[in-house]
Image (tube, grey):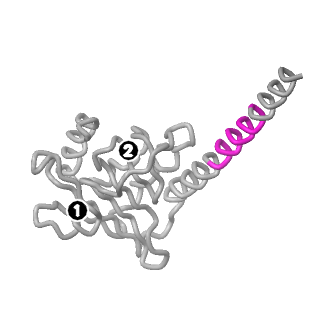
Amino acid sequence: MRERKNRIWHLLIGFVFALTTLNACRSQDAVKQKLVSELTSLATIQDFDDITVSTYSINPWLFPRERYTVAEIEKFAATKKFTLNGAEIEGKLDLFGEIKESDFELSHKAHPKKTRFYVLIESAEDGKLLEMLLFGGYSTYIVNGVEIKPSDKILEALTPLLSESALRDLEVYRDRECYCD
């Protein structure tokens, strides 16, 4: 009799665990779908008049272990800033249209929102369209508030928007991705 009760409890616990796991997968899929939708919508923009791309980067060799909040990186004197406006952006967002759910993986652990390389695409009318915090020291990126594991596809989509200096910094950071704490 005791063995039968144990077996029932084990089956019940297994069933609850399976439901919990399936539910977690479903919620991750919804987050990934929303993020993919936000990223691919950048490629469909037709009117670039009120669009601005701002890139903030800190030299990878300058205080290499320091991480910054968005407010700090925007104000830091050593931050290199590069901006594209309007027609300068046209044709440079197309690679975002090729991003799929399989191109990135969600991070399962939340980290502080720190960065050394920050990209913001915004519209005067719609506000922030894309906000990326890269190389914050935890081998993750934060894209529109969603923490993901490093994705070459997302970095490839970003490269047409960067200055030569920012591209060099990006490559150094990419090579040293796991110099994290």
Helix, strand or loop status at disc 1: strand
Residue 20 inside the magenta-drawn segment: yes
Question: Residue 102 appears at what percent x and percent y?
Answer: 55, 37
Q: Quadrant of residue 90?
A: bottom left
Disc 2 or disc 1, which is closer to the eye?
Answer: 2
Residue at the image point whose x is 82% and y is 24% from the top? 7
First to last magenta residue range: 14-27
Tag 2: residue type?
Answer: Thr
Q: Quadrant of residue 76?
A: bottom left
Residue that mark 2 sits on: 140
Q: Is residue 51 left or right of residue 1?
A: left
CB-based contact (under 8 Å), mark 2 and mark 1:
no
Residue 109 inside the magenta-drawn segment: no
Question: Residue 107 appears at what percent x and percent y?
Answer: 47, 43
Helix, strand or loop status at disc 2: loop
Q: Residue furthest front?
A: 2
Residue at the image point whose x is 38% and y is 48% from the top? 141
Image position of 126 with respect to 110: above or below:
below
| Quarter of the figure that contains the C terminus | top left
Residue that mark 1 sits on: 82
Sooner in the amino-acid sequence: mark 2 or mark 1: 1
Q: Are there few (<14), some (14-19), or many (20+) residues within 10 Å of tag 2?
A: many
| Quarter of the figure that contains the N terminus | top right
Image position of 56 with respect to 19: above or below:
below
Tag 1: residue type?
Answer: Phe
